[in-house]
Amino acid sequence: MPLPGPPPAGGTITPKGLIFGFIAIVIMIILVYLLTVYFEKYAERKEKEIEEELRELEDGGDVF
């Protein structure tokens, strides 16, 4: 029984690999977008909370 030859040289791109890579990149872009939107809303919410707390402190006379 003859020994198998060396594997083919690297650099071959199969259609499956191309599709998988494209889908992976699209999913990563969507995740980054969703995280960006979430963190922007989170920052706005925290900013409103801080403003409310500052207003309460000013009304109570605790801020010098």
Image (tube, helix red, strand yellow):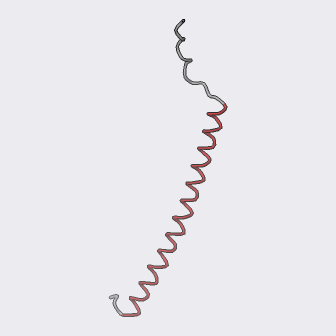
> As drawn, is 58 to the left or to the right of 40?
left
Residue 20 sits above or below residue 45 on the image: above
> As drawn, is 61 to the left or to the right of 16?
left
x, y percent for residue 22: 63, 41
Where is the N terminus found, in terms of image quarters? top right
Residue 31 sits above or below residue 50 on the image: above
> As drawn, is 55 to the left or to the right of 17?
left
x, y percent for residue 40: 53, 66
> 16 or 48: which is nearer to us?
16
Residue 26 sits above or below residue 46 on the image: above
Q: Residue at (54%, 11%) from the top-left corner?
A: 5
Q: Residue at (57%, 54%) from the top-left corner?
A: 31
x, y percent for residue 43: 49, 69
Q: Residue furthest bottom?
A: 60
Q: Residue at (56%, 17%) from the top-left corner?
A: 8
> As drawn, is 19 to the left or to the right of 64?
right
Q: Residue furthest front?
A: 1
